[in-house]
Amino acid sequence: MATLTETPAALATRHSIVNGRDETGAAGVRDTISPADGRPFAQVSLLSGAQAGAAVEAARAAFPAWSALPFRERARYLLRARDVLVERADEMTRLIAREQGKPEAEGHAAEVLPALDALKHLASSSEEALREEDVESAVLVLAHKEGRLLQVPYGVVLVISPWNYPLSLPLICVATALIAGNTVVLKPAPATTLAGLEVGEIFRRAGLPPGVVNVVATDDAVAAGLVEDPRVGKIVFTGSVATGKRVMAAAAKNLTPVVLELGGKDAAVVCRDADLDLAAQGIVWGAFLNAGQTCASVERVYVEAPVADEFVRKVVERTRALRTGDPGRGDTDMGPLTLERQRRIVEEHVADAVARGAKVETGGETPAGPGFFYPPTVLTNVTHDMRIMREETFGPVLPIMAVSGLDEAIRLANESDYGLTASGWTRDGDTARRLQQELQAGAVSINDCISTFGEPAAPWGGFKQSGIGRTHGLAGLREMVQWKYVTRDPARAPKLWWYPYGEDLRRLMASAVRALHAKSAWARLKAQLALAGSSRFRRRAGVARVVQNADKLL
């Protein structure tokens, strides 16, 4: 990691990265808290509004040279960043365990590997995906022109990243923006700013020019100013629905386009023909991965009644076997929640469910002692009038509802304001296809869950209030560019429709309407002969060019 400077309180302090250099914040410091014991272990200096604005300016100044680099040169920088991350993978997972609470094995699997795969994929596939395209005109009188479609970068991309995946989420967004020719200002979440600064350090060690990647530690007021900065060309925000709405409203002041990757209340449908051992094992992992703090966590299960009791028994057995504790220990399956306030939300959802008749099969009680731990919890007898089935819990709770059949399961799964991912568990091909077609979500997996995030060629994003736009894959890459149509006219004659107007042009245009769009071939032919008789048409449109493109008269 980058060098930490010692403070009088003996807490090491990290600083923002602006224009390739460490920038000591002028707006005070913020403690970094370990969720395993609730104690501060480092500090981050916070930038003032002017300092944060300087980061945007640094990115703006670096944009012309960076965007002018060939794709292959930008790809080489991404591959160097990949090499740096490979070398520092153990350091990064230790930091994530300490700052965010994810066990180190999970840090490798869910943070480091997806980031490495994305860097490799972007470096190898982006040039072809963003290649210029020739565009043949569909209009007769424009057919002689040379047309091309370009995909050009926005300029400065502001990436606002969350605390639940503090390495993979921002790094992939930053890398996607970079390969498309943009420069970046990354604003990491307050709770995991150290990991966000390490993303900047990875690109700095990869040798990127100053100003291309800037990482800013700020308070909320300064962050709001970044969103409204007119020098920002696009915003990529990952976080809650409530904050996403505020980002979108603020971005609208400058009509800054946004990508919003927001919350989820992702459903799993367990069919009566499912392999129940596989379904239980997969859904327990999908519910409790990262202590349930995953936007694509399995937060609702609908299981067909004939197999419900057996499925619940298998889920409870596997849940009770999970080992919760210090994320730095190799034998820990689930660490603490990252934030104490998030644990309170989990407690409130469970209490509401129990008060309305839910049954706690295992877990459900906050343990005594330090840290923000909460046990993996399974609930049954749940209904849709409970918060646990409607609101995003973002914690280690798995509610299971028995349903009469597949129709009811799909209907209830779709009764949500969210639609990020969903999963179906079945051995029947026709049932699998129906689930893939009818479940309303940005990604639907059969006999698996969540892992679509790890596929760099697949788009990531959701329906409804789960967000706008996509990250990852070709769709995510094209979020980082804007379409530009360019044309060149080699002809020297004035255009047919230019001034001066007059009765002859009126008749000519009326003939053109019929020549190109009359219902019958005979009517079109008559109008085409009338066009050919017009001296203005012959002089300005060019008969030879018309003959060369006669197919467009059909």
Image: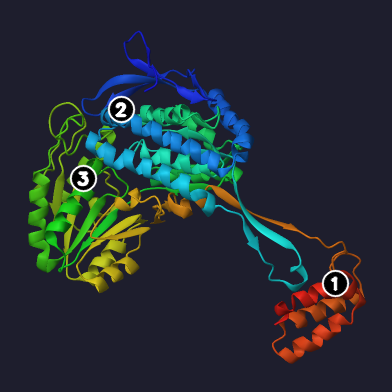
The residue tagged 1 is 542
Who is closer to the viewer here, 237 or 356? 237
Q: Please, is residue 400 above or below residue 339 in the view?
A: below
Residue 110 locus on image (x, y percent): 29, 42
Q: Nearer the viewer, residue 348 or 554?
A: 554
- Residue 27, percent across and down? 47, 19
User: Rounded to the nearest whole Å, what is the CA distance between mark 1 and mark 3?
Assistant: 70 Å
N-terminal label among 2 and 3: 2
Q: Nearer the viewer, residue 111 or 86?
A: 86
How dense is the environment of label 3, judged by Cα within 10 Å: few (below 14), some, or many (20 and up)? Answer: many
Image quarter for residue 494? bottom right
Q: Amino acid at mark 2?
A: Glu
Q: Which mark is residue 91?
A: 2
Quadrant the N terminus occupies: top left
Q: CA distance from mark 2 to mark 1?
A: 69 Å
Q: Which residue is mark 3?
A: 288
**Alpha-carbon span between mark 2 and mark 3:** 24 Å
Q: Identify the secondary structure beneath mark 2.
A: helix
What is the number of callouts on the image? Answer: 3
| 159 lies left or right of 34 | right
Tell me what residue is drawn at x 50 percent, y 46 percent.
248
| Location of residue 320 (image quadrant) | top left
For residue 399, side relative to residue 182 (left or right): left
